Amino acid sequence: MADLTTEFLGIKSPNPFWLASAPPTDKEYNVRRAFEAGWGGVVWKTLGAEGPPVVNVNGPRYGAIWGADRRLLGLNNIELITDRPLEVNLEEMTRVKKDYPDRALIASIMVPCEEEAWKKILPRVAETNADGIELNFGCPHGMAERGMGSAVGQVPDYIQMVTEWCKQYYDRPVIVKLTPNITDIRHPARAAQAGNADAVSLINTINSITSVDLDNMAPEPTIGGKGSHGGYCGPAVKPIALNMVAEIARDPATAGLPISAIGGVTTWKDAAEFIALGAGNVQVCTAAMTYGFKVVEEMISGLSHWMDEKGYTSIEDFRGMATPNVTDWQYLDLNYVAKAKINQDDCIKCGRCFAACEDTSHQAIAMSEDRTFTVKDDECVACNLCVNVCPVEGCITMEEVPAGQLDQRTGEVVSDEYANWTTHPNNPSAVAGE
């Protein structure tokens, strides 16, 4: 049986599924329910410094993007860090960690970019016996306007400086949470490493406006006739998160830097993909907010079953296995050839593949009078658009053509003798002996 136990920065948890710093981890009640449901760890909702209180809006805090079936694809939130007193949060964290010593508990922190502010709060967090801290350099709204959150995360020098302060005044693991609202994620990751961060977590939310209310002419969610940009999360951001995790994992400058992956993790498969790209665990938010805390049961059972099928006994067995296969475009094999193949038994004759290919691609699908669709091998460039628009999973597949069977210029079947275009008799240069 697969063992999902993880040890991230020396912090043990029964599985790699942690709840990210967000509304689900805002108070003791929620966190206890999460641990009872089976979550391996939580990152407590971001703590702020004592002083002027944090005041959230008393109105809608979320915008949304849905799929055609009303499935939630993305959330935009304008909620700030915790608006509960620091002392209350610290007391609750202390109690929770005492009662759940086998679960990971991380304190997310965001205070002004001043050494004294960090020096003041870190000893108080240490007293909770939390397993580590996460520096919130990612929040793109509200706090960024006050010189915190992504305002720090977008400046590598600030990242390194604050990380160094935290390593000086705190003796447990320091995780730096990175903002995706930047041109090249490698630069802030390198800065975190230069500041001696123990790990990075990413991605935080993406700056966004999900929709506009065309009656009130204001972004949604609308507060008193006005709206604001917020942080976008959920399944829709997973491709962006996967790429950024991969960029850090394969960057020679940050090779070996532990990664806690965040961004659209909804199923066990999502988690496995991030781990295959090098992540040591995953953090989840939107899935829990959509389906409740018990969604972790499916994540745990699904990952465990898949690992059993593959023969993996721990996540370390496959962690990072996909990273070497992430490359730059110029290194792709241009001699690889594939062709689309339509399974006529599965085809429902909807014509989507034909319309997409005929109008917007390479005119490589033919339609007969009885609406039978077939692929023209000589025109197919294996773009796989037809696979993606087909509503029947597995009906259209991409089949690799073995080397030597297809002329790379004409699409015609040729013998192995002329598999390479440079030796093919149709090549004028070859005929001329050039």
Image: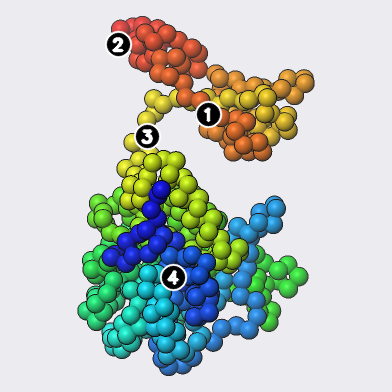
Which one is earlier in the sequence, the residue at label 1 or at label 4? 4
**Residue type (three-letter) at the residue carrying disc 4:** Val
Cα distance in 3D space between marks 1 and 3 = 17 Å
Identify the mark at residue 332; answer none if there is no mark: 3
Camera-side residue of 326 and 142: 326
Cα distance in 3D space between marks 2 and 4 = 67 Å
Task: Look at the numbered disc 3 and give the secondary structure of its residue.
Answer: loop
Task: Look at the numbered disc 4 and give the secondary structure of its residue.
Answer: strand
3 displayed left or right of 123: right
| Eye-nearest disc, 1 or 3 | 1
| Eye-nearest disc, 3 or 4 | 4
| Eye-nearest disc, 2 or 4 | 4
- Locate residue 87, reporting x and y percent: 42, 90
Task: Look at the numbered disc 1 and give the secondary structure of its residue.
Answer: strand
3 and 2 marks in contact (CB < 8 Å): no
| Eye-nearest disc, 2 or 1 | 1
Cα distance in 3D space between marks 3 and 2 = 27 Å
Q: Residue at x 40, y 49 (%)?
A: 2
Which residue bears the numbered disc 1? 398
Mark 2, residues whose alpha carbon is within 10 Å: few (<14), some, or many (≥20)? few
Q: Residue at x 62, y 31 (%)?
A: 395
**Residue type (three-letter) at the residue carrying disc 2:** Glu
- Locate residue 24, reporting x and y percent: 53, 73
Q: Is residue 96 above or below residue 205?
A: below
403 displayed left or right of 159: right
Cα distance in 3D space between marks 1 and 4 = 41 Å
Residue at the extreme front: 1
Which residue bears the numbered disc 2? 434
2 and 4 marks in contact (CB < 8 Å): no
